[in-house]
Amino acid sequence: MTTKAQRQHLICELLASREIGSQAQLVALLADHSVDVSQATVNRDLDELGVAKMRTAGRTAYAVPETDAPETLPTNTLRRVFGDWVLDVQSSQNIVVLRTPPGSAHVVAAAIDRSNLDGVVGTVAGDDTLLVVAAENPGGTAVADYCRELADL
């Protein structure tokens, strides 16, 4: 069984390694890797990953946006990411610790980094644990409370 995080990681790898012009083509490539999903699921994954269609050599193909200048992630997408992957939230002074399923911390960290959350200085992701460094004001407790709200915990 493939988790959502594993599937989305594979999607990024596939998009980086070849030109993919349609969701149906991506669904077929995922099936070749023993990942059976619907086109609707792929559509949601592409949206959450911030993937867009780009014009290349007269054709259009999906591409993961450059990490140099990411667009700000909408709050509803951040809420979906937190709802899917954040299992627990703890805080200590200006540090917030988020627990996720194995292999998912980087997805949550990227979403936080792209969301420009007020009071967040930065993130550090491991495999299933994510540290969020909060600014002195509002502090770790306020950021943790907001993270709990986003995750519906």
Image: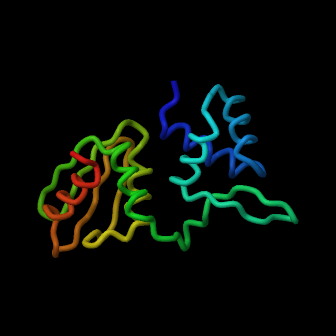
Front-lying residue, 36 or 139:
36
Query: Residue, x 23% and y 54% (percent of image)?
Result: 149
Front-lying residue, 109 or 81:
81
Residue 151, given in percent of the width and then of the height, sits at 28, 49
Quarter residue 62 falls in: bottom right
Query: Residue, x 48% and y 33% (percent of image)?
Result: 3
Quarter residue 116 falls in: bottom left
Residue 76, given in percent of the width and then of the height, sits at 39, 58
Location of the C terminus (image quadrant): top left
Residue 94 relative to residue 129: left or right: left
Is 87 above or below relative to 136? above
Residue 108, given in percent of the width and then of the height, sits at 39, 52
Q: How is the image coloured?
A: rainbow
Residue 23 relative to residue 66: left or right: right
Query: Residue, x 55% and y 43% (percent of image)?
Result: 8
Front-lying residue, 43 or 68:
43
Front-lying residue, 7 or 130:
7
